[in-house]
Image: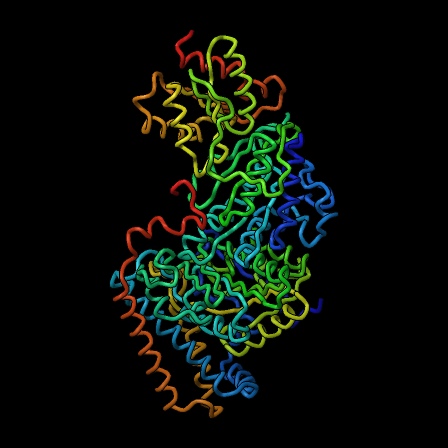
């Protein structure tokens, strides 16, 4: 198995934090070799990648990223109005990961992710109306109002869900890949999770089986550097997630998650390995969430300076500028996209508002596929 | 009819279902080359090959979850736990994934999977390898829980479990694998889930027993017959969903109930059955319901202590005599 773009050397033990885990200085997460400080260099790289794709594909990707951003902003608003209940984990800042990764798939490929799942559902093709209605707990939701924010499912587009237990979806994704190989199809499975899930046994058990049995699963670690309020440095002995693939002799790559096209390219390489050779891959995609872990996050574990530093690298801002500089995107076209997105988000919110609550009888349906004895 | 062991009846059910449906596969620790830790999967690797009979690493959470994922992709996995003691490592995938997937996806993803293996006490393997797990799993809506007590039931129920579209926890019993009984030869022989079986008819008291306690209860009934007490022995066979009608009908006939179970009584299946009986047949009860359960201790190693921890004929006889006010 050839290793693709080996990660930078391990930085295990290079960071010091206090026993209480509170960063004593201004929190400065380690700078990755791939996630550049230098936005100019990043943009130059992205512009080179732009040349390899047709304009409509590029603009469709930008459209999806903006749609995710605006829908999530609407979610924040609706949450504060009490229209969305429970836990609500926003994807703002990480849009390039889902959009870039899923743009490298065929429609019949499978996707699973964690509870931070709105962006992946949109990128896989679940209608925003149904996503919003699910968040509102309505009958028109993609899971009929029974799953909520953390459990979006859409069998129509092979979106196998949002899963609520950290790392729980990793064995599931491994099993979906087992299933497609068993059936002899060339479908691949993308299984997303955060970097905190890497500390769970489920991650290691899954990677071992996937490489042992050559299962066409692509494991995408969205390393946003915080598991809830605990920084990666305070939770992981070896900070380099992609290196963990070495323990299983699995191919891995380290990817800049702020560059949607870098993500697309890396995933495309992994998809090729999976389709042609049933080979699994671990991708560590370095990203950052601009919002809290969930809507109830006090945000006291990271500094405003740090957040602003990453906002400078906003994946949508970067992509917009690159596309403009390459002449793919005009101000008029951008305004058109923003307008279409605004309309789609308003329509989704309206659909969710107007969708009826689930009928009381729904409480007892879908418990069993083959109900027995009146259960 | 052929007389065979529980082990062979289970093996036959697995073979027939693997033959019948290409989407069925069997996975677990030592199920293939080793031929099964308890030989339930004997010769299946030779017959169906390594694609469908798969040895796993010792990674219970991993392969349980892999099975659930494979079911989402349209397969019908049979996941063997070498013993259900090890399923404790996999409970997140059984409970949080398998049991809830259909519901939280709004009916989009059914999980037709069987988790099977021996449950309950074994022979002198001490606390971590000798425990009955049925009340854990039966607690959760979304799974079905099956506990056969005869070779015929084992075969018929396992075939139904494999054909069922829901997750089924199929609890065998290590001490019973060698038990023999008549098994129908018909390849289409199945026993529906959720239907209890009256293993012996009687008029004076009902003994409700499952799994290992069924043969013990039948022996106790024989003993009681000599003492002039006619016992009915009801085997629920499926714990969830429970066939409460058959149980209540028996109670209405005998008016006295003893529940025999290998598991602990606290928060146990027997407590649930007793609660249902008192609601549905309160006026028919002539005595409080008695439970005979495993001792409320971790299973000891020493042979004499282990024997004391598992309900026996004598304890059941004593309990029936108590509910009949004979002592």
In percent of width and height, residue B275 lies at: 36, 29
Which of B98 and A287 lies nearest the eye of the viewer? B98
Q: How is the image coloured?
A: rainbow
Which of B303 and B159 lies nearest the eye of the viewer? B159
Residue A198 is at least partly visible in this image = no
Above or below residue B102? Residue A272 is below
- Identify the residue at horizontal 39%, vertical 27% (top origin): B249
Residue A368 is at least partly visible in this image = yes
In percent of width and height, residue A283 lies at: 58, 67
In percent of width and height, residue A29 lies at: 49, 66
Q: Is residue A338 left or right of residue B27?
A: left
In percent of width and height, residue B193 lies at: 49, 39
| Residue B219 position by quadrant | top right
Question: How many callouts does the rendering have?
Answer: 0
Quarter of the N terminus of chain A within the rendering? bottom right
- Identify the residue at horizontal 36%, vertical 60% (top origin): A88
Q: Is residue A52 left or right of residue B274?
A: right
Which of B202 and B84 lies nearest the eye of the viewer? B202
Quarter of the C terminus of chain A within the rendering? top left
Above or below residue B319? Residue A74 is below
Which of A232 and A158 lies nearest the eye of the viewer? A158
- Identify the residue at horizontal 54%, vertical 52% (top origin): B68
């Amino acid at each position: 198995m050839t290793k693709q773009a080996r990660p930078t050397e391990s930085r295990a033990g290079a960071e010091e934090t206090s026993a209480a885990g509170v960063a004593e200085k201004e929190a400065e997460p380690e700078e990755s070799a791939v996630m550049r400080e230098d936005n100019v260099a990043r943009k130059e790289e992205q512009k080179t990648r732009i040349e390899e794709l047709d304009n409509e594909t590029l603009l469709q990707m930008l459209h999806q990223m903006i749609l995710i951003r605006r829908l999530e902003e609407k979610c924040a608003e609706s949450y504060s109005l009490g229209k969305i209940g429970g836990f609500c984990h926003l994807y703002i800042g990480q849009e390039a990961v889902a959009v870039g990764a899923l743009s490298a798939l065929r429609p019949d490929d499978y996707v699973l992710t964690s509870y931070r799942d709105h962006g992946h559902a949109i990128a896989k093709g679940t209608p925003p109306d149904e996503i919003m209605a699910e968040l509102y707990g309505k009958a028109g939701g993609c899971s009929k109002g029974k799953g909520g924010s953390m459990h979006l499912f859409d069998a129509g587009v092979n979106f196998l869900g949002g899963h609520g237990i950290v790392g729980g979806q990793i064995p599931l994704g491994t099993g979906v890949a087992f299933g497609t190989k068993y059936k002899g199809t060339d479908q691949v499975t993308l299984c997303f999770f955060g970097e905190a899930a890497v500390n769970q046994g489920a991650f290691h058990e899954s990677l071992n089986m996937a490489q042992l049995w050559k299962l066409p699963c692509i494991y995408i670690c969205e390393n946003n550097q915080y598991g809830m309020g605990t920084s990666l440095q305070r939770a992981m002995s070896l900070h380099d997630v992609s290196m963990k693939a070495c323990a299983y002799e699995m191919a891995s790559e380290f990817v800049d998650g702020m560059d949607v096209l870098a993500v697309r390219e890396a995933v495309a390489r992994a998809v090729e390995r999976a389709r042609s050779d049933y080979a699994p891959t671990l991708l560590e995609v370095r990203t950052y969430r601009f919002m809290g872990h969930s809507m109830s996050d006090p945000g006291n574990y990271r500094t405003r300076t740090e957040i602003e530093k990453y906002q400078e690298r906003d994946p949508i801002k970067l992509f917009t500028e690159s596309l403009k500089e390459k002449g793919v995107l005009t101000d008029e076209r951008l305004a058109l996209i923003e307008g279409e997105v605004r309309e789609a988000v308003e329509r989704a919110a309206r659909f969710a508002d107007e969708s009826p609550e689930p009928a009381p009888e729904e409480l007892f349906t879908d418990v069993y596929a083959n109900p027995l004895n009146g259960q | 009819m052929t007389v065979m062991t529980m082990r062979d009846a289970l093996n036959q059910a697995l073979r027939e279902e693997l033959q019948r449906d290409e989407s069925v596969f069997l996975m677990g620790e030592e199920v293939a080359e080793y031929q099964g830790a308890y030989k339930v999967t004997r010769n299946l690797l030779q017959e169906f090959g390594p694609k469908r009979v798969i040895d796993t690493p010792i990674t219970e959470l991993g392969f349980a979850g892999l099975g659930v994922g494979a079911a989402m992709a349209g397969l019908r996995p049979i996941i063997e736990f070498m013993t259900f003691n090890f399923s404790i490592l996999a409970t997140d995938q059984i409970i949080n994934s398998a049991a809830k997937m259909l519901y939280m996806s709004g009916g989009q993803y059914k999980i037709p999977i069987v988790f099977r293996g021996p449950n309950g006490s074994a022979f002198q393997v001490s606390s971590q390898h000798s425990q009955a797990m049925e009340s854990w799993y039966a607690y959760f809506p979304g799974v079905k829980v099956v506990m056969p007590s005869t070779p015929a039931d084992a075969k018929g129920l396992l075939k139904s479990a494999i054909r069922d579209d829901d997750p089924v926890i199929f609890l065998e019993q290590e001490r019973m694998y060698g038990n023999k009984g008549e098994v129908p030869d018909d390849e289409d022989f199945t026993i529906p889930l959720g239907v209890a079986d009256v293993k012996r008819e009687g008029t004076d008291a009902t003994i409700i027993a499952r799994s290992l306690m069924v043969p013990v209860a039948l022996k106790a009934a024989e003993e009681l017959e000599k003492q002039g007490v006619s016992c009915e022995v009801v085997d629920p066979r499926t714990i969830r969903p429970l066939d409460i009608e058959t149980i209540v009908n028996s109670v209405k006939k005998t008016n006295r109930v003893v529940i025999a179970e290998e598991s602990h009584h606290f928060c146990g299946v027997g407590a649930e059955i007793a609660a249902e009986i008192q609601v549905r047949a309160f006026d028919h009860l002539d005595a409080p319901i008695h439970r005979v359960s495993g001792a409320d201790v971790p299973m000891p190693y020493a042979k004499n202590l282990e024997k004391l921890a598992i309900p026996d004929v004598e304890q059941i006889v004593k309990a029936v005599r108590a509910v009949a006010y004979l002592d």
